[in-house]
């Protein structure tokens, strides 16, 4: 039906596209229509994997299209979009290699794919690229999945949830790759190569000496069928090489980077299947992206050089090309590539440090993307509604943990107090500070360290600081010299007298306000006020010159210390008073 139509405008093309979508009853003919161009349908239905699978179900063999016209397809898609129609469902994928932890760069790639799918009502596919059998582990795969789920990046299809294009692990798809390699060989687009490692090394050295591109120049690309069969008969191992067309310019339109062009003379015939039978990365990717009907490939710019090989495979197998978007790398503050030497770089590490998933999503989204405004704090729902590939910048993004911590603090402000206290309490238990939560001391400590918090893990550091009392080192420090010289002993003796009479204990029972009233009374007696009054009180009770309200701390310090785990430096109020008594006696 579509072949009989010859649209003369983008608007008419969009109209025909909509009719084709209606009549295709859910098969991927619409996808083919877009990718190959409506005008190309001059004879039959284009040979496209989705169409073929549909046709095979009804026992009909699809015929190849005569020509392609991407411009007409683009016009049709733009016109359809202008009318609010979606001619083709967006399908994107995140395809990690399970050889380590989920790096923040990988997490951002997954996020951009997920947001794009959400923005356009599409599908987000998780595919595991585990053909590196020596380094890939199921443990790493499972950890990556846990990290993605913690971030809230749920997938529609994948190894654990299945889907119409299973399996979703490349190691389980080797027969599929062999089938397509044989197809390329049968069409003289690939060939067996029997070159040994020694022969290949000699080619490389010769190319270096002659200052030629390091490309394959072996004889097997020109070998006769008889030579190949004779070599196979000897049992010699061989790989499959793709036959690269000479002197051909290959151009893609990258949504982020614009037009990118390569010349095939810089490439040479490349390996598809190793002699072990294992497929090479670029071959797997091209086959999987087509069979899984991926419409948009969104990935890091380090994959841009791989695109040439993948496009050649797409074209040789008459697969439709997806749209490409190559995102710039994430750099460290010193503008070098972000690595472990710069501190935490994996999602799991940030999770363990107490960062919130919504804050991580917010921060990662702004590494290379913005919505064109000054807004910095986004909910995941806002990002899903605003994200677009066109707003991704070409410049590298710099990972700034200070900015991430600030952003996490902003998101923490929106967390209900009960939930925040539970997060802090769990962190204090898991880090070995407290035995359990819910006790009077635990509740007081959690309340103290939860104020003005940026990262949950900071609460652990603050808790250890509040429980300890470095009185001796502080009173002998240069920073406290002014406090010591302002008759500090007089104030210490007043505290000791209040403790011995029971007045201090009664004051602590009345809470922070009662403590403040008592301190002001002491100030009037000693003619002190402001910093001259409150700073020496802080030093005497906490051994520090900065920290939370002293009255709140005293309530916590006067409680039973059995909740604190062994190995944690905890100086209760009674021990602090003893230290003050010893210091006063020594003056």
Image (tube, rainbow, N blue to C red):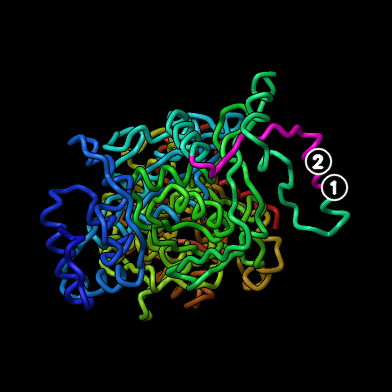
Question: What is the x, y in percent for residue 188?
Answer: 54, 42
In the image shown, does 155 or 289 lie closer to the viewer?
289
Proximity of marks 1 and 2: CB atoms separated by less than 8 Å = yes
Q: Element type at marker 2?
A: helix
- Tag shown at residue 205: 1
Q: Can residue 66 be seen in this snapshot?
A: yes
Q: Residues within 10 Å of mark 2 (few under 14, many from 20)?
A: few
Please state if 574 lies on the left or on the right of 483 as rendered: left
Which contiguous range is marked in magenta?
187-204
Residue 434 in the image: x percent, y percent? 44, 37
Q: In what quadrant of the picture does the C terminus appear?
A: bottom right
Residue placed under numbered mark 2 in the picture = 201
Based on the picture, tell me whether residue 198 belongs to the magenta stretch. yes
Is residue 265 shown left or right of residue 390?
right
Q: Is residue 45 left or right of residue 227?
A: left
Provide residue 428's location: percent of width, then percent of height: 44, 42
Is 20 displayed left or right of 367 in the figure? left
Q: 524 and 371: which one is in front?
A: 371
Which residue is outermost to the top?
A: 234
Q: Quadrant of residue 192?
A: top right
Q: Say what secondary structure mark 1 lies in.
A: helix
């Amino acid at each position: 039906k579509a072949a009989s139509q010859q649209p003369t405008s983008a608007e008419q093309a969009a109209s025909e596209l909509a009719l084709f979508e209606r009549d295709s009853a859910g098969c991927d003919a619409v996808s083919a229509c877009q990718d190959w161009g409506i005008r190309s349908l001059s004879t039959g239905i284009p040979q496209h994997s989705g169409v073929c699978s549909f046709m095979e179900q009804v026992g009909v063999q699809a015929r190849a299209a005569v020509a392609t016209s991407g411009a007409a397809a683009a016009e049709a898609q733009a016109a359809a979009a202008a009318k609010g129609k979606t001619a083709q469902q967006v399908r994107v994928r995140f395809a990690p290699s399970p050889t380590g932890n989920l790096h923040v760069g990988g997490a951002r790639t997954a996020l951009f794919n997920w947001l794009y799918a959400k923005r356009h009502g599409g599908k987000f596919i998780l595919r595991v690229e585990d053909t590196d059998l020596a380094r890939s582990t199921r443990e790493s795969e499972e950890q990556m999945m846990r990290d993605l789920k913690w971030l809230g990046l749920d997938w529609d299809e994948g190894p654990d949830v299945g889907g119409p294009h299973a399996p979703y692990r490349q190691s389980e798809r080797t027969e599929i790759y062999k089938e397509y390699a044989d197809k390329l060989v049968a069409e003289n687009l690939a060939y067996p190569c029997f070159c040994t490692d020694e022969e290949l090394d000699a080619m490389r050295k010769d190319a270096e000496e002659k200052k030629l591109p390091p490309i394959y120049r072996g004889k097997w690309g020109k070998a006769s069928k008889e030579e190949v069969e004779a070599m196979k008969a000897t049992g010699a191992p061989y790989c499959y090489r793709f036959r690269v067309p000479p002197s051909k310019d290959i151009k893609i339109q990258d949504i982020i980077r614009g037009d990118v062009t390569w010349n095939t003379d810089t490439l040479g015939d490349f390996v598809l299947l190793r002699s072990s039978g294992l497929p090479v990365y670029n071959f797997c990717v091209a086959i999987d992206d087509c069979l899984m009907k991926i419409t948009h490939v969104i990935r890091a710019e380090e994959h841009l050089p791989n695109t040439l090989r993948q496009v050649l495979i797409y074209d040789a197998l008459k697969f439709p090309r997806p749209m490409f978007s190559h995102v710039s790398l994430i750099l460290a503050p010193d503008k070098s590539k972000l690595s472990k030497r710069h501190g935490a770089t994996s999602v799991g590490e940030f999770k363990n440090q107490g960062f919130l998933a919504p804050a991580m999503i917010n921060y990662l989204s702004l590494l290379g993307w913005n919505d064109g405004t000054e807004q910095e704090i986004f909910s995941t729902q806002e990002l899903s509604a605003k994200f677009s590939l066109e707003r991704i910048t070409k410049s590298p993004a710099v990972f700034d943990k200070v900015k991430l911590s600030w952003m996490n603090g902003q998101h923490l402000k929106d967390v209900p107090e009960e939930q925040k206290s539970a997060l802090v309490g769990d962190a204090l238990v898991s880090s070995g500070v407290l035995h359990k939560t819910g006790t009077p001391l635990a509740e007081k400590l959690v309340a103290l360290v939860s104020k003005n918090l940026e990262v949950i893990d900071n609460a652990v550091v603050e808790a250890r600081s509040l429980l300890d009392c470095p009185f001796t080192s502080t009173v002998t420090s240069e920073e406290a010299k002014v406090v010591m010289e302002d008759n500090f002993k007089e104030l210490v003796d007043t505290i000791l007298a209040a403790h011995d009479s029971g007045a201090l204990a009664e004051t602590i029972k009345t809470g922070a306000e009662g403590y403040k009233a008592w301190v002001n009374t002491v100030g009037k007696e000693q003619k002190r006020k402001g910093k001259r009054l409150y700073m020496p009180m802080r030093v005497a009770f906490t051994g520090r010159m900065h920290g939370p309200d002293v009255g709140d701390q005293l309530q916590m310090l006067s409680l039973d210390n059995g909740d604190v785990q062994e190995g944690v430096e905890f100086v209760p109020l009674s021990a602090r008073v003893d230290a003050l008594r010893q210091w006063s006696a020594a003056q």
